[in-house]
Amino acid sequence: MYSILKKEIIAYLSSLVAYVTIGVFLLVLGLFLWVFPDSSILDYGYAGLDSLFSTAPYLFMFLIPAITMRSLAEERREGTFELLLTRPLSHLQIVLGKYFAAVILVLFALLPTLTYYYSVYVLGTPQGNIDSGAVIGSYIGLFLLGAAFAAIGLFASAITKNQIIAFTIAIFLCFFFYNGFDSLSGLLSLQSSGIQSLGITEHYQSISRGVLDTRDLAYFIILAALFIWFTLFALLKQQQKSLGKNVTSGIFLLIISLTILTNLTFTRFDFTKEGRYTISQASRNVLDSLAAPVKVTVYLQGDLSGGMKRLQRATNDMLTDLQAYSHRKLQFEFVDPLKGVAAERQEQTINDLQARGVEPTALSVKTDDGVTQKTIFPGAVVSANGKEIPVKLLYQQTQMGLSADEVLNNSIQNLEYAFTSAIKKVMRGGKPQIGFTTGHDELNDVQLNDAMKSLSDGFEVGRVDLKSIPFDSLLKIRLIVVPKPEKPFTEPEKFKLDQYLMRGGKILWAIDQVNAELDSLRGHGGEQLAFSKQLNLDDQLFVYGIRINYDLIADLSAAQIPISTGNIGGQAQIQMVPWLFYPIFMPLAKHPIVKNLDGIYGEFVSTIDVLDTRNVDKTILLASSPYNKNLKAPHMLSLQAIEQQPDPKAFQSVPKTTAVLLEGKFMSDFKNRPLPEGLGENIAIQNESKPTKMIVISDGDVFKNQVAADGSPYPLGYDHYSKQTYGNKNLLLNIADYMTDDSGLIALRNKEIKLRLLNRARVRNEKLYWQIINTIIPLLLVLIFAIFQHYTRKRKYAH
């Protein structure tokens, strides 16, 4: 076999056709990857070789048939195949020798493409910012694809004596196995039948990302082995011989055994540096337990920019990875919602999608020519059992201080959580209940409109009157929110909350300890006395490990409010000025509740003391900036203070805690105490809680949406004065997910994927240089090798 392999390689590399074929392959590949804008790595802007591994398969369909077309066809046409059989070589040895020679020649053609890796490595920002592990894994995928195509090409060369016919048949078969099964699946509407898995595309795309799944590896081995068997069968049939039943049965038994084994138990090797395609155990548990088929329809399709293409590819990758653990119960498709829709009906289509929770988004995308606006649909719908849940793919669209690339990267980091959480919700029998307390002059329904509306996608949301609700009904609620009470809680109400917590219930406290309102300031001549509220909750929170102080935080990191600065021509002159009592909290903690959140908008916030209590872990979620001052209540507030420029030195202080997560086993506030009078029902006192959670925020307005003059609510987190959106809504959604989820899915938000960008300034200035390098250097390498090989061969035979 080795002699055949050596003969084939020397013969091929001794012909001019070989270098012309490989040269054309490298030239076309270089033009696609470095010159043509639609597939250019330089225009894509990210430090990766994704374009190489998506373009190379189509060029392989021509390169590899050109390499293999003469392997057997020429031998048979010239009658030299019979001479080979006179040597002590079996048909299998001859075929394998020619096959491995073709594979080695494919590797030879790929070697010059390492120039592309070097170029991206140099152009990365910082230099070297390329995921080498992912590139290695992708090259493995390309090698396996080349090996499969080589087997197909060898078979085509075995069934005809004409090289051109062999070349044509090999191209057709390579194309059919790469794209044909996908096309058949679409034409016959068999997307969920598994017919796509018979084709190469599904398996190659998985490996080309840098993930080696043993099922994909088995597929390529089986495909190559099958066509090598076909080749042997064709050659023996032409000589009126047979493989023998034992050989044939053995091959098919091996193929069937390998197929069954890899489907029953499989392993995935993630070569990427951050393990970005490694699905968490929490997600695997959700997918493994799917009781019914789930369909995901993704609307991020159409003419997309480089960044959106990356998000689309990442979404496809994530759904592919999730599908791998779903026992084929998860199916997905990408749809362009406006494709084929008449212009006059597009608005209705957009409205229909909005009603389903898929929002169109205008995104500013930086290009070499400036900034362009793109209207896209970065959303998906997860459906099962007649229910559907929308999924937003573009996460944190309005984060302050983040570039478009950073927003996209955060979105990609969030994909696993977004899809797994939606799948879990759509498969659940009913939505978890969340109750907002009422009866103590809490925020009204208009002020909580967007909070309750936003939660209603995944939860059943309503108001809870602690005075009248039976305790058994209270226990059915997964999360109770206490939103800015103004009146004191009675002892029976406190007792119900306490025992609800003791039995594993979760509570979110949003408490104002000091009475202060901007509207009151404006209506009382610009002054108001901020005084302490009496909510009768201090003793209860103290036992749980928290004290909300009777003070206010003045912070230099603050939102702006409109102030009238005079009157000109009968028109009031309004100026936006910072109001130190409206602090903006920038989440710096790595906890999944606040990770990647925008600034949180606060109003008249107090400080929190965290007390030392046993069996309870405390995590600070939000804190003031280092430039703050706390003012004890009572304190006279005045709008005239805005006219005074604050001295930063006077505000230098340690950050003050404003939101805390508490997790563990809490002691009851009613331990060793009798049942409170007026309870109305017999509830057994539990002195220590089950493991549970609570969150305390020292701002009652944190989940209040602003209300327009006509009474219509603004979105939660939107400040209609500054026209800026803060992260309050996403904070609420994260809290709801974290508090109601016992499977640990929220921890997926800790997943980090490094942003890998090209140095755009360098790309812009040196674009032509790198285009020349990557189109000419690979050709020069082949030319130098050809000259060297010719010179060596000439010297050898001259002697």
Image: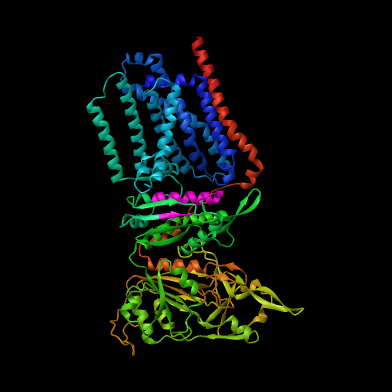
In the displayed structure, would residue 653 be above or below residue 348?
below
Q: State the image coordinates of residue 490 (x, y, percent, origin top left).
A: 40, 87
| Count of numbered tags | 0
In the displayed structure, would residue 646 be above or below residue 527?
above
Q: Who's the residue at 49% across and 19% down the image? A: 14
Q: How is the image coloured?
A: rainbow
Q: Name which quarter of the figure residue 560 lies in.
A: bottom right
* Residue 323 in view of the camera: yes
* Closer to us: 66 or 121: 66
Q: State the image coordinates of residue 752 (x, y, percent, origin top left).
A: 47, 55
Q: Residue furthest toward the bottom?
A: 677
Point out the image quarter for the N terminus.
top left
| Left or right of 340 in this view: 579 | right
Q: Who's the residue at 29% across and 82% down the image? A: 683
Q: State the image coordinates of residue 40 (x, y, percent, origin top left).
A: 57, 41
Q: Residue furthest toward the top?
A: 799
In the displayed structure, would residue 729 be above or below residue 231?
below
| Left or right of 105 in this view: 240 | left
The span picked out in magenta is: 296-322
Q: Name which quarter of the figure residue 170 lies in.
A: top left
Does residue 210 belong to the magenta stretch? no
Q: Residue furthest toward the left?
A: 246
What main secondary structure does the magenta stretch of the protein show? Answer: helix
Q: Residue furthest toward the right?
A: 569
* Closer to us: 707 or 752: 707
* Residue 213 in view of the camera: no
| Left or right of 525 in this view: 632 | left
Q: Who's the residue at 50% across and 56% down the image? A: 378
Q: State the image coordinates of residue 34 (x, y, percent, origin top left).
A: 58, 38
Q: Name which quarter of the figure residue 138 lies in.
A: top left
Does residue 299 belong to the magenta stretch? yes
| Left or right of 349 in this view: 76 | left
